[in-house]
Image (spheres, rainbow, N blue to C red):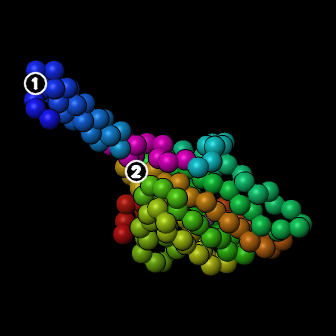
Amino acid sequence: MRLNKSNSLLLVVLVFLSVALLGCREKASKETAGSELYNIFPKGELGPAGNFTGKAWNMGLVPNDSTYTTLVGNVYFEPGARSNWHTHPAGQILIITDGVGFHQIKGQPKQLLHKGDVVQCPPGAEHWHGASPDTGLQQLYIVPNTEKGIVQWLQPVTDEEYKSK
Ligand code: MN
């Protein structure tokens, strides 16, 4: 194809559009980081301030009943938000679907969590989970054998504990 005047103009427009589109994509992904993240489920209800520091949104997915004796839900922790220390009498499984966060068992180092991580919290182990300071965390939780109990809430995770390694 010979480049005549209108072809050249078309080429210029196409190059301009490509650059503009690439720019938009980069901007969009930067805006996603640290905000709502990718949400599979509705945000749900704000968790009670007595059990959480910052904002943690809970969406129940499978209610506890005598057939399944398993509780399943999704929590979105906003950046900096975390649970209080707590225990699950029959343990808990966490599946991270987006963002960055932490899980810590009392007396052990903080575990860094990313999308795709699966955490098994042992029965009765005092622990907390939540988002990183700059990026939120989307996590599914599964509480099995709910006939043994679901959760026992303890004291808040202090800023010092949250920042320590
Ligand atoms: Mn837990």
Find residue 78 and report its horizontal and vertical position in percent: 49, 46
Q: Secondary structure at mark 2?
A: loop
Residue under label 1: 4
Residue under label 2: 135
**What label does residue 154 carry, if any?**
none
Q: Amino acid at mark 2?
A: Thr
Tag 1: Cα neighbours inside 10 Å, few (<14), some, or many (≥20)? few
Against 1, residue 130 (above or below) is below
Q: Amino acid at mark 1?
A: Asn
Q: Is residue 131 visible?
A: no
* The quarter of the displayed image where residue 14 is located: top left
In the displayed image of the protein, which residue is found farthest to the front? 1
Q: Secondary structure at mark 1?
A: loop
Q: Which residues are magenta?
A: 30-39
**For marks 2 and 1 on the same chain, the one whose residue lies earlier in the sequence:** 1
Find residue 58 and report its horizontal and vertical position in percent: 64, 49
